Image (cartoon, rainbow, N blue to C red):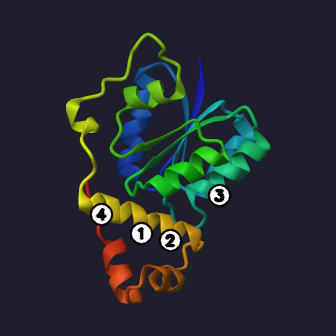
Amino acid sequence: MEKILLVDDEQFFLDRMNRAFIRRGYATYIASSYDEAMDVIEEHQPLLAVFDLKMPGKSGLQLLKDALKRVPELSIVVLTGYGSIATATEAIKLGAVSYLAKPADVDEIIIAFGDDTDREPDFSQEELLPPSLARVEWEHIQRVLTDCDDNISCAAKKLGIHRRTLQRKLYKYAPK
């Protein structure tokens, strides 16, 4: 039975994901913060993990770095509701095996780990369309923000917009 660590600060999503993995035969461990996740990694040393990107306290990217230092063979899929090319690139550079947007179902996550080699990913026609202008803007903002180490004032200056305008744009959900 494979052990998997699920880390998300949204309790409803975490419980739903936990039940789905249990139904598929996985031994699951759950955590809702960086500290809880590191405790589970130390104690149980799972080989699979699903990390939320945005959490209170330390982020999923920091958890990714520190988890791989403790268990280098850990395969990690990063999930987020605030996806961008910049954070996806950063997660992959740090060692994540995949990066998925929420809400992702458990079968998509299993495919992302590469455990289910019989199933081919289904690329719908919708995925082949170019991104909307709003989406491109969102990704550019995220890239600049990452380059500025998440400093809003620095990113606003580089983007040539007021800090409050940038904060309002970041408060909204990522466009489709």
Q: Secondary structure at mark 1?
A: helix
- The image position of residue 11, as x and y in percent, is 40, 52
Q: Secondary structure at mark 4?
A: loop
Separation (CA) of disc 2 from disc 1: 6 Å
Q: Which residue is mark 2?
A: 145
Q: Nearer the viewer, mark 1 or mark 3?
A: 1
Q: Which residue is mark 1?
A: 141
In the image, residue 10 sits, relative to residue 144, either above or below, namely above
Crowd around label 2: few <14 · some 14–19 · many ≥20 (10 Å): many
- The image position of residue 153, as x and y in percent, is 50, 86
* Dot 4 amino acid type: Tyr
Q: Is residue 79 visible?
A: yes
Q: Are marks 2 and 1 in contact (CB under 8 Å)?
A: yes
* Dot 1 amino acid type: Ile
Q: Which residue is mark 4?
A: 173
Tell me what residue is drawn at x 41 percent, y 87 percent: 163
Q: Is residue 53 visible?
A: no
Which sits earlier in the primary sequence, circle 4 or circle 1? Answer: 1
Which sits earlier in the primary sequence, circle 1 or circle 3? Answer: 3
Image quarter of residue 22: top left
Which sits earlier in the primary sequence, circle 3 or circle 2? Answer: 3
Marker disc for residue 62? 3
